[in-house]
Image: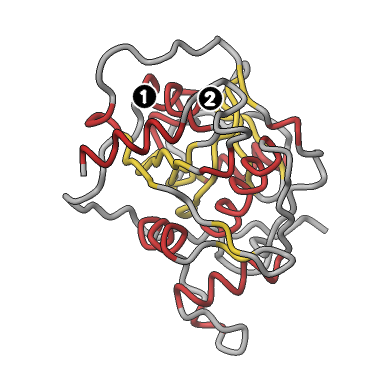
Amino acid sequence: MAVVLKFGKKPATYDGRDLQYTSYRIGVLPPHPDQFGHETLIGADAWGMLGNDRVGDCVFAGSDHETMLWTTEAGDQATFNPQNALDDYGAVTGYSPDVPDSDQGADVRQVLQYRQQTGLIYAIGNRHKIGAYLALEPGNTNHLLEALYLFGAVGIGLQVPSSAIDQFRAGQPWSVVPDASVAGGHYVPIVANRDNLVVVTWGQLQQMTLPFYEKFCDEAWAILSPEMLKNGVSLEGFNLPALQADLQEVV
């Protein structure tokens, strides 16, 4: 029996108060290599569906996956289970397993605010907060790769075409198929750049071509997490506290 694949991202919303990546992108940023990422630090079977085979909690499943990667990079991996994601999903959206119609998906910005102010709960009950989040221009691949290299993951919203479901099941990269209809809104973290972009979705690593990102991305967020740091810097040697200090001058 094929694994059930749920969506769950509401349409992208916009707010003039959002911090913009371009507002901080001043001067020369550190160059990134052609291929990079730390996705192999987590075993292929360790990501988990985190409830996204049961309900439309993809924004929370993807957020948990981001946190798993950041904490692993810093040497103290947080472990999440489906109930963790479902608890946060319910806290933000009002979802209740006793009320099937309450499974209506989530707004990414609202979830980002929750992650900053409250934090995501994980297996032993602690919460993981993010420091800040910056809006990227959807489909801008240059900014995407810069932010991905700096922050270890970029959370994106997609209007996923039906062809992507077939490609996922066949183990093929997500690529543009002409005239494919939209199947649903979906949130995934981009975690690496190899021959293609690499995302985590439905418990697996999935390749995605740059043209697919450019065509189907409707929102993208660079997320600053202090949990990606070890001794104050990332694995790339990036000083996140210095950036956070600079951001205070922008707000």
Any mark on residue 143, and which?
A: 1
* Left or right of residue 4: residue 211: left
Residue with the most extreme front position? 231
Indicate left or right for 197 with 117 as reference.
Answer: right
Q: Earlier in the sequence, mark 2 or mark 1?
A: 1
User: 200 and 113: which one is in front?
Assistant: 113
Q: Which mark is residue 209?
A: 2
Q: Residue at position x 25%, y 29% from top?
A: 22
* Disc 1 residue type (three-letter): His
Give the farthest residue toward the bottom: 98
Callout 2: helix, strand or loop?
Answer: loop
What residue is drawn where x is 40% and y is 39%? 217
* Quarter of the C terminus within the rendering: top left
Query: Could you say which quadrant of the image residue 142 lies in?
Result: top left
Residue 162 is situated, as x and y percent measured from the top left of the image, at 53, 46
Disc 1 is placed on an element classified as helix
Q: Nearer the viewer, residue 223 or 57?
A: 223
Question: Which three-letter amino acid code belongs to the residue tagged 2?
Answer: Thr
